[in-house]
Image: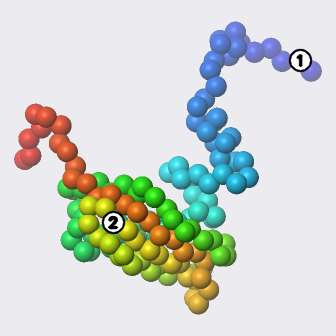
Amino acid sequence: MNFQMARRAERMNPSIIREILKVTERPGIISLAGGLPSADTFPVEAMAQAGVVLAHLSGLFDLELHHCFFVGIQEAKFRAPVVPGEVLTIEIKALRLGRLSKLSGEIRAGEQLKSSATFTAVIDAKVKPAGVSTP
Protein backbone atom coordinates (compact mmCIF):
# COMPACT_ATOMS: atom_id res chain seq x y z
CA MET A 1 0.00 0.00 0.00
CA ASN A 2 1.31 3.47 -0.84
CA PHE A 3 0.32 6.60 1.10
CA GLN A 4 0.77 10.10 -0.16
CA MET A 5 1.23 12.91 2.35
CA ALA A 6 0.12 16.47 1.87
CA ARG A 7 2.97 18.74 0.72
CA ARG A 8 2.72 20.87 3.86
CA ALA A 9 3.31 17.75 6.00
CA GLU A 10 6.69 17.34 4.32
CA ARG A 11 7.67 20.84 5.50
CA MET A 12 6.52 20.37 9.12
CA ASN A 13 9.13 20.53 11.82
CA PRO A 14 9.18 17.78 14.45
CA SER A 15 7.47 18.65 17.73
CA ILE A 16 9.94 19.50 20.46
CA ILE A 17 7.52 18.00 23.01
CA ARG A 18 7.42 14.66 21.18
CA GLU A 19 11.22 14.68 20.95
CA ILE A 20 11.52 15.32 24.71
CA LEU A 21 9.02 12.54 25.46
CA LYS A 22 11.09 10.14 23.33
CA VAL A 23 14.13 10.88 25.49
CA THR A 24 12.17 10.29 28.73
CA GLU A 25 11.30 6.77 27.54
CA ARG A 26 14.95 5.70 27.45
CA PRO A 27 16.11 3.37 30.23
CA GLY A 28 17.97 5.19 32.98
CA ILE A 29 16.38 8.59 32.24
CA ILE A 30 14.42 10.14 35.10
CA SER A 31 12.11 12.92 33.97
CA LEU A 32 11.21 15.67 36.41
CA ALA A 33 8.85 17.24 33.87
CA GLY A 34 5.46 18.14 35.26
CA GLY A 35 2.46 16.12 34.13
CA LEU A 36 4.45 12.93 33.57
CA PRO A 37 4.10 11.09 36.87
CA SER A 38 6.23 8.00 37.12
CA ALA A 39 5.87 5.29 39.72
CA ASP A 40 9.67 5.36 40.00
CA THR A 41 9.99 9.09 40.72
CA PHE A 42 6.64 9.78 42.39
CA PRO A 43 8.04 9.47 45.93
CA VAL A 44 10.66 12.17 45.26
CA GLU A 45 8.02 14.54 43.91
CA ALA A 46 5.75 13.87 46.90
CA MET A 47 8.58 14.55 49.36
CA ALA A 48 9.41 17.83 47.61
CA GLN A 49 5.78 18.96 47.83
CA ALA A 50 5.61 17.97 51.49
CA GLY A 51 8.75 20.07 52.01
CA VAL A 52 6.90 23.14 50.72
CA VAL A 53 4.09 22.42 53.21
CA LEU A 54 6.66 22.22 56.02
CA ALA A 55 8.19 25.55 54.95
CA HIS A 56 4.69 27.09 54.87
CA LEU A 57 3.79 25.75 58.34
CA SER A 58 7.07 27.13 59.69
CA GLY A 59 6.03 30.62 58.51
CA LEU A 60 8.92 30.82 56.05
CA PHE A 61 6.93 30.34 52.84
CA ASP A 62 3.75 32.09 51.68
CA LEU A 63 2.45 31.13 48.23
CA GLU A 64 1.32 34.71 47.58
CA LEU A 65 4.71 36.21 48.47
CA HIS A 66 7.34 33.59 47.63
CA HIS A 67 8.63 31.14 45.06
CA CYS A 68 10.11 27.83 46.14
CA PHE A 69 12.68 26.36 43.77
CA PHE A 70 14.06 22.89 44.35
CA VAL A 71 17.64 23.11 43.18
CA GLY A 72 19.05 19.77 44.23
CA ILE A 73 18.20 16.22 45.16
CA GLN A 74 20.87 14.36 47.06
CA GLU A 75 21.07 10.78 48.27
CA ALA A 76 17.80 9.69 46.63
CA LYS A 77 17.19 6.01 47.29
CA PHE A 78 14.34 4.02 45.78
CA ARG A 79 14.02 0.92 47.94
CA ALA A 80 10.67 -0.45 46.72
CA PRO A 81 8.14 0.65 44.09
CA VAL A 82 5.00 2.49 45.12
CA VAL A 83 1.97 0.37 44.26
CA PRO A 84 -1.40 1.97 43.42
CA GLY A 85 -3.72 1.79 46.41
CA GLU A 86 -0.96 1.87 49.05
CA VAL A 87 -1.36 4.36 51.87
CA LEU A 88 1.86 6.33 52.11
CA THR A 89 3.29 8.20 55.07
CA ILE A 90 5.60 11.08 54.15
CA GLU A 91 7.95 12.32 56.84
CA ILE A 92 9.94 15.49 56.20
CA LYS A 93 12.58 16.96 58.50
CA ALA A 94 14.11 20.40 58.17
CA LEU A 95 17.88 20.13 58.36
CA ARG A 96 18.10 23.87 57.71
CA LEU A 97 15.25 26.35 57.04
CA GLY A 98 15.89 29.73 55.51
CA ARG A 99 16.33 31.29 52.09
CA LEU A 100 18.52 28.28 51.30
CA SER A 101 16.82 25.30 52.91
CA LYS A 102 17.86 21.68 53.25
CA LEU A 103 15.25 19.00 53.93
CA SER A 104 15.33 15.24 54.29
CA GLY A 105 12.43 12.91 53.78
CA GLU A 106 11.23 9.33 53.88
CA ILE A 107 8.19 7.65 52.41
CA ARG A 108 6.76 4.50 53.96
CA ALA A 109 3.87 2.18 53.26
CA GLY A 110 3.16 0.77 56.70
CA GLU A 111 6.59 -0.16 58.08
CA GLN A 112 8.18 -0.63 54.63
CA LEU A 113 10.55 2.17 53.62
CA LYS A 114 9.80 2.99 49.97
CA SER A 115 12.25 5.84 49.36
CA SER A 116 14.33 8.54 50.99
CA ALA A 117 16.12 11.68 49.83
CA THR A 118 17.67 14.96 50.87
CA PHE A 119 16.58 18.15 49.07
CA THR A 120 17.99 21.63 48.67
CA ALA A 121 15.54 24.45 48.00
CA VAL A 122 15.69 28.21 47.55
CA ILE A 123 12.80 30.27 48.90
CA ASP A 124 12.72 33.68 47.29
CA ALA A 125 10.38 36.66 47.31
CA LYS A 126 8.22 37.15 44.23
CA VAL A 127 9.14 40.30 42.34
CA LYS A 128 6.27 42.34 40.96
CA PRO A 129 6.67 43.80 37.47
CA ALA A 130 7.29 47.55 37.42
CA GLY A 131 4.12 49.59 37.32
CA VAL A 132 1.90 46.92 38.94
CA SER A 133 0.15 48.10 42.06
CA THR A 134 -1.30 46.01 44.85
CA PRO A 135 -5.06 46.44 45.43
Q: Please state which of residues 45 and 123 is positioned toward the viewer in this rendering.
A: 123
Provide residue 51's location: percent of width, then percent of height.
38, 69
Query: In the image as oriented, which residue stretches furthest toward the bottom?
Result: 111
Helix, strand or loop at mark 1: loop
Q: Earlier in the sequence, mark 2 or mark 1?
A: 1
Where, by quadrant of the figure, is residue 19 drawn?
A: top right
On the question of residue 83 being in view, the answer is no
User: 15 or 112: which is nearer to us?
Assistant: 112
CB under 8 Å between callouts 2 and 1?
no
Who's the residue at 66% across and 72% down the image? 81
Q: Which residue is mark 1?
A: 2
Q: Where is residue 7, by image quadrant?
A: top right
Q: Quadrant of residue 5?
A: top right
- Provide the secondary structure element on which disc 2 rests: strand
Above or below, 132 against 62 in this view is above
Task: Please tell me how crowded label 2 is: few (under 14), some (14-19), or many (20+) other residues with Cα within 10 Å.
Answer: some
Q: Position of residue 24 (x, y in %)?
A: 65, 47
Asked if one can make out residue 94 in the rendered structure from this viewpoint, the answer is: yes
The foreground one among 89 and 59 is 59
Q: Quadrant of the N terminus?
A: top right
Provide residue 116's location: percent of width, then percent of height: 54, 74
